[in-house]
Image: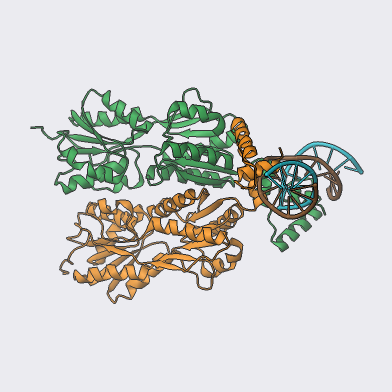
Chain colours: A orange, B green, C cyan, D brown
Amino acid sequence: MSRATVSRVMNGSATVAPELAARVRAAAEALDYQPSVVARSLALGRTGTVSLIVPDLGNPMFQGVLRGLSQAVSADGCRLLVSESAENVEEEVVLAIEARRRTDGLVLASPRMADDRLLALADKLAPFVLLHRELPGCAMPSLSVDNTAGMEAIVAHLIGHGHRHLAYLAGPAASTSNRERLAALRASGLTLTELACGPRFDDGHAAAPRVAGSGATAVVAFNDMVAFGLLSGLHELGLRVPEDVSVTGFDDIPFARFTNPPLTTASIPKNELGRQAWTRLRALIGGEPGGYNVRYQPRLLVRESTGPARRTA
Amino acid sequence: MSRATVSRVMNGSATVAPELAARVRAAAEALDYQPSVVARSLALGRTGTVSLIVPDLGNPMFQGVLRGLSQAVSADGCRLLVSESAENVEEEVVLAIEARRRTDGLVLASPRMADDRLLALADKLAPFVLLHRELPGCAMPSLSVDNTAGMEAIVAHLIGHGHRHLAYLAGPAASTSNRERLAALRASGLTLTELACGPRFDDGHAAAPRVAGSGATAVVAFNDMVAFGLLSGLHELGLRVPEDVSVTGFDDIPFARFTNPPLTTASIPKNELGRQAWTRLRALIGGEPGGYNVRYQPRLLVRESTGPARRTA
DNA sequence: CTGAAAGCGCTAACAT
DNA sequence: ATGTTAGCGCTTTCAG
């Protein structure tokens, strides 16, 4: 029989005589034959693979996204290529272009490059979906988190406990999330001490002395990792949380509820972001519209790392 | 000019007149031309992509491996496909086969399938490198951790503190690491209470009451995540660590040094495992031998979660 | 319903 | 040093 027939059978085309199809399948089984994925990709113009680009694979926030995306992609028989830009914009640009050339579409998680740069690349990178980032004027869908609302909830909670002087442990300057969270804090009208920090455990840990010296009664960390590092640093300094100082995080990564004390934080749907990203991307690849942009509203989880403000001297 | 010339230029072949090469490059630049990765893969028989298969993307241990591997692979201009088997053996088998068909090689991290099954698949999956697993009779290289030595170090440390009754919070039954760690514990001659648990935060957290009731003065957790969850659960029960009970982990994931109290654990080289996996795999793909198997010796990190055994009643 | 043939975009052996 | 030609392994019109 001809290869065309084999191809039809392997692709489940109905226009093959059942008897012949059975013979093909038997032969394939016997020879352990599997069509070449690469050749198929070339002929089809689709690879059945998409890429995820993240700034930092070490962040449990992105791991949640990765996981949700990975499972959703797998469920449709597709595969996922993962790249880490290491918080480096130039790297990010190169990776994105390269990744797009190998795969059918991209998920850009918290891209660090500036709006105009991303906009200029949009045609080359499409189809893609943006995570944790909105890009006015861009036709690609975006799934993001309402950082402002999340911060407002945290601030309201803190105000309710009598806090009037906050410290903010800032994340990467290039992070949109960081900028939005900071802006919301500035808009709160409370006294704010801004401390340059970073996104990791160690950054939070190292910031403890500065926090202690700031006079703030509550400290708002860029994310849970930082908050966790801070908790540890504060403990070493002999400061009690929340008696001496309240601490909040952001993201609700898996261990946030197990810290000592458990962390008050704004929870965001990490897996869901990954899953929805695939839904959008799959649609785009199929030539359909990507749907409406969505902004997930964070949920404030009040745990034990926050309490009444201590009297200031 | 002909496409062969273009191909030569794009691949940096020296046998092209400099002037012509320059023209080709200029044209490529002007047209924003980039050779098709897929067509290239088909012609070459190599995709420039390798796959990583892990049981659990949520485990920071594997994230360390992923990170090291990802960076090493990127540094050589290659790409990484990531799949999660979700601790499911059948899934793992299918994923591995599928992943291998799309890429030039595999890194199998802590595969859960049985030895004979893996051995039977070896030809089909090769080239690959095994992480956290040794497979007698298999020609593929293996990078693993000496779990026995690691546990012995932990036990010796605990014995030095007067502990004579340990509890073990067991990980997944299909995990080789779990089996080896447990075996080392059993061989210690100490009284051992074995508690079925699991590999995650919640598992450790949920085990706290059983630990409290076990009569053990020290509890050895399968890994750091479990230890961390346990720390939290113990705290809720009003038990102090290490005064009432000592706790140890395994792996030394990034936040282990920031827990309260900081976790005594056996450190293993996570990034290094990923990086070395690529070195081996790259060699294999190039037709060279994969080198000797190596077994990393864990390093005991004594922190504050362990101390003298309390008097037993 | 099946086979023949063209083509996906590139590389490599061969010829000039 | 460059062009010609033949694949890489599949899908897909187009005939029959």
Residue A268 point in image, percent of width and height:
35, 61
Out of B116 and B1, give the one closest to the viewer: B116
Residue beneath the point at 35% across and 56% down: A203
Residue A280, above or below A186: above
Residue A165, above or below B159: below
Residue beneath the point at 34% across and 59% down: A251
Residue B41 point in image, percent of width and height:
66, 45
Residue B89 point in image, percent of width and height:
42, 36
Residue B122 point in image, percent of width and height:
53, 29
Quadrant for residue A273, please give it. bottom left
Out of B108 and B74, give the one closest to the viewer: B108
For this view, does A252 lie left or right of residue B96? left
Out of C12 and B254, give the one closest to the viewer: C12
Residue B82, above or below A30: below
Q: Residue furthest left?
A: B313
Q: Quadrant of the C terminus of chain B?
A: top left
Q: Quadrant of the N terminus of chain B?
A: bottom right
Out of A105 and C12, give the one closest to the viewer: A105
Residue beneath the point at 81% across and 55% down: B19
For this view, does A34 lie left or right of residue B153? right
Can the viewer see residue A206? no
For this view, does B32 lie left or right of residue B115? right
Can the viewer see residue A155? yes
Give the tally of numbered discs.
Answer: 0
